[in-house]
Amino acid sequence: MSLLSGPPRVITVGAELLGEALDAQAVPRTAVAWRPPLPGTAGALTRVLLDPRRAAANERAVRRLTAARPHLAGVRRAAEALDLPPRTFLHAGPPITWDRASGPMRGALIGATLLEGWAADEREANDLLADGRIALEPCHHHRAVGPMAGVVSPSMWMFEVRDEEHGGAAYCSLNEGLGKVLRYGAYGPEVLDRLRWMDAVLGPALAAALRVSGPIDLGALIAQALQMGDELHNRNRAATSLLLRELAPALVEAAPGTAAEVLRFAGGNDHFFLNAAMAAAKAGTDAARDIPGSSLVVAMARNGTDFGVQVSGLGSQWFTGPAGVPDGLYLGAYGPADANPDIGDSTITETAGLGGFAMAAAPAIVRFVGGEVGDAVAATRSMYEITLAEHPAYQIPGLGFRGTPVGIDVTLVARTGVLPVVNTGIAGRVAGTGQVGAGLVSPPAEAFTKALAALTKRAAIQ
């Protein structure tokens, strides 16, 4: 009877209509941020949560991810580093065929065919790709990642990142700079000339410099850059400066004839560090792979048509849904009608607790992707709801040096209905258009519900 003898204590859950009515009457209340689970997942959630392996498996997976110590160990040609099969290109995202490839992906593949000298002109390149005479495989299947279209051909140079804790390695192509570039589907003479210069000058100079300097601790640079206003996906200004400070003396010593040219190129591109950060993130998430019973997401990637995820306890299987068009700011006269659906492997940064998950560390990012500073902070805070840990090394000053949210759990995504936040560049739908904007995008929920269903089947046979 005490309920009726004192003032009411009100808890509101779900729709805010009742809460707002109570606020209007000055009734104190406690609001609970509750959301229903993703549609159709209740039964699967129960079975996966009851899997006796899950808690220990996830603890092990996230511990391996956060314990990784990525070091930039070298720069090597893809043909040497990745053991590519003959006549094979790598691309961003889950597997895709030429007939389903978007404009930027097709443009990048045509450009790579011309770069390798496998075709004399655009028409011949198109025919080779359409007929399947050039094989296409995801970067992720070769311990690699690629930004935007992410196309890797044998002659391209790759950052080689070694995980000093677990012994693994991951690779990412070198950043071409801004403007008309292969990763956005451009393949004109200026694009191919730049790639040839990267092959003849940039790659060899960086390789020589790293032989002089020795491995560079990327984890330490990332941790420092987060405290200098970067989030390591779409803002890499501080990290690029830190990397060039490490490389400059060795470049001058190892390649005196081209050092100034290389430093001028890298210093004029604030995203130069992004590709190294992607390889570092890939090295960490790969360390968490193949742990039976784990519901930890180890890859998120897009190919311009599909958005796919991979889960630690489910091997190399992809779970996909349609890639969405980012919501954000557009350059010049461009608008949503000019945008290609989301594309690129750079979501490996979010998978490792950076990028959209670390936006609270980079308030200036809102000038690039849209919104207010408070939106960036709110985005990071919401990611703690779907992750298993806080990164011990990657910390956010504005949140009291709280570690970035890391370790996306499929079950938490399903239970809360909260989808990972991704900030990204927006590629033009037409090959060669280049970047038309930047913004935020959410993965398709069905990629996670499909992964949850597969976890249910694995749990049932244990």
Image (spheres, rainbow, N blue to C red):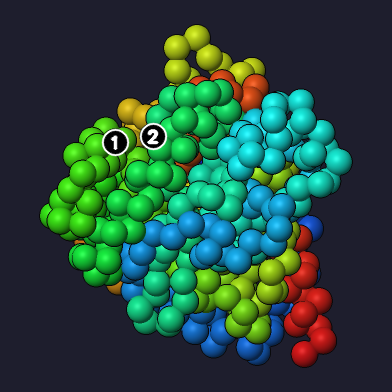
Name the amino acid, label 2. Gly
Residue 265 badge: 1
Label 2: which secondary element:
loop
For marks 1 and 2, give the CA distance.
Answer: 8 Å
Residue 325 % position (x, y): 62, 32
Q: Is residue 401 visible?
A: yes
Residue at the extreme right? 131
The residue closer to the viewer here, 216 or 21, is 216
- 149 over 430 or under it: above or below: below
Residue 447 % position (x, y): 70, 54
The residue closer to the viewer here, 8 or 370, is 370
Which of marks 2 and 1 precedes in the sequence?
Answer: 2
Residue located 64% across and 52% down the image: 90
Residue 85 % position (x, y): 69, 62
Label 1: which secondary element:
helix
Q: Is residue 395 visible?
A: no
Q: Are marks 1 and 2 in contact (CB under 8 Å)?
A: yes
- 360 over 437 or under it: above or below: below
Q: Which residue in the protein does label 2 denote?
A: 177
Residue 462 badge: none
Residue 459 % position (x, y): 75, 82
* Quadrant that contains the C terminus: bottom right
